Amino acid sequence: MALKLKVPNIACDGCAEKITESIHVMEPDAQVEVNVKDKTVTVESTASEESIKQVIVASGYEIAGY
Ligand SMILES: [Cu+2]
Protein backbone atom coordinates (compact mmCIF):
# COMPACT_ATOMS: atom_id res chain seq x y z
CA MET A 1 0.00 0.00 0.00
CA ALA A 2 1.46 3.35 -0.97
CA LEU A 3 0.14 6.26 0.98
CA LYS A 4 0.85 9.91 0.28
CA LEU A 5 0.04 12.39 3.00
CA LYS A 6 0.26 16.15 3.23
CA VAL A 7 1.85 17.17 6.52
CA PRO A 8 1.76 20.98 6.66
CA ASN A 9 3.92 21.42 9.75
CA ILE A 10 7.02 19.72 8.37
CA ALA A 11 9.65 22.45 8.54
CA CYS A 12 13.09 20.90 8.15
CA ASP A 13 15.15 17.74 7.74
CA GLY A 14 14.85 17.13 11.48
CA CYS A 15 11.10 16.78 11.07
CA ALA A 16 11.62 14.37 8.20
CA GLU A 17 13.94 12.25 10.33
CA LYS A 18 11.58 12.27 13.30
CA ILE A 19 8.63 11.15 11.19
CA THR A 20 10.67 8.48 9.41
CA GLU A 21 12.00 7.09 12.68
CA SER A 22 8.58 7.06 14.32
CA ILE A 23 7.14 5.07 11.44
CA HIS A 24 10.09 2.68 11.50
CA VAL A 25 9.56 1.94 15.20
CA MET A 26 6.15 0.55 14.33
CA GLU A 27 6.93 -0.77 10.84
CA PRO A 28 10.65 -1.49 10.40
CA ASP A 29 10.17 -2.52 6.78
CA ALA A 30 8.21 0.55 5.70
CA GLN A 31 9.67 2.67 2.93
CA VAL A 32 9.27 6.26 4.01
CA GLU A 33 9.97 9.29 1.87
CA VAL A 34 9.56 12.76 3.27
CA ASN A 35 9.65 15.76 0.97
CA VAL A 36 10.40 18.76 3.19
CA LYS A 37 9.79 21.32 0.45
CA ASP A 38 6.40 19.92 -0.58
CA LYS A 39 5.57 18.88 3.01
CA THR A 40 4.53 15.41 1.96
CA VAL A 41 5.16 11.98 3.42
CA THR A 42 4.98 8.92 1.19
CA VAL A 43 4.81 5.57 2.92
CA GLU A 44 4.99 2.17 1.31
CA SER A 45 4.16 -0.54 3.84
CA THR A 46 1.80 -3.30 4.84
CA ALA A 47 0.47 -1.29 7.78
CA SER A 48 -2.99 0.21 7.59
CA GLU A 49 -3.47 3.81 6.51
CA GLU A 50 -5.02 4.57 9.89
CA SER A 51 -2.07 3.25 11.89
CA ILE A 52 0.45 5.20 9.81
CA LYS A 53 -1.57 8.38 10.30
CA GLN A 54 -1.77 7.79 14.04
CA VAL A 55 2.00 7.40 14.31
CA ILE A 56 2.57 10.68 12.47
CA VAL A 57 0.07 12.52 14.65
CA ALA A 58 1.52 10.95 17.81
CA SER A 59 4.97 12.23 16.86
CA GLY A 60 3.60 15.78 16.84
CA TYR A 61 2.61 16.44 13.24
CA GLU A 62 -0.63 17.33 11.53
CA ILE A 63 -2.06 15.59 8.51
CA ALA A 64 -4.12 17.70 6.13
CA GLY A 65 -7.73 16.54 6.12
CA TYR A 66 -7.29 14.13 9.01
CU1 LIG B 1 11.94 20.27 11.66
Image (cartoon, rainbow, N blue to C red):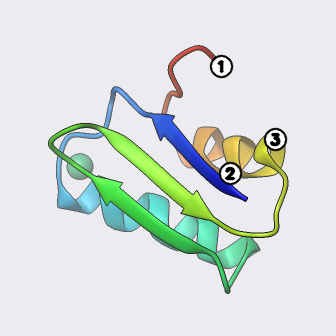
In front: label 1 or label 2: 1
Quadrant showing the N terminus: bottom right
Q: For the image shown, how many numbered marks are present on the structure?
A: 3
> Which circle marks residue 55 in the picture?
2
Residue type (three-letter) at the residue carrying disc 3: Glu
Q: Residues within 10 Å of mark 3 (few under 14, many from 20)?
A: few
The residue at label 3 has a CB less than 8 Å from ligand 1: no
The image shows residue 8 at horizontal and vertical percentages of 34, 26
The image shows residue 58 at horizontal and vertical percentages of 65, 44
Residue type (three-letter) at the residue carrying disc 1: Tyr
> Which circle marks residue 66 in the picture?
1
Q: Which SS class for mark 3?
A: helix
Circle nearer the N terminus (2, 3): 3
Between 16 and 38, the residue placed more toward the observer is: 38
Instruction: Kindly report the distance in space between the C-alpha atoms of the residues bearing marks 2 and 3.
Output: 9 Å
Circle nearer the N terminus (1, 2): 2
- Identify the residue position indicated by label 3 in the image: 50
The image shows residue 13 at horizontal and vertical percentages of 19, 60
Left or right, 59 with respect to 35, comes to: right
The image shows residue 64 at horizontal and vertical percentages of 50, 19
Instruction: Kindly report the distance in space between the C-alpha atoms of the residues bearing marks 1 and 2.
Output: 13 Å
The residue shown at (42%, 33%) is 7
Q: Residue furthest front?
A: 1
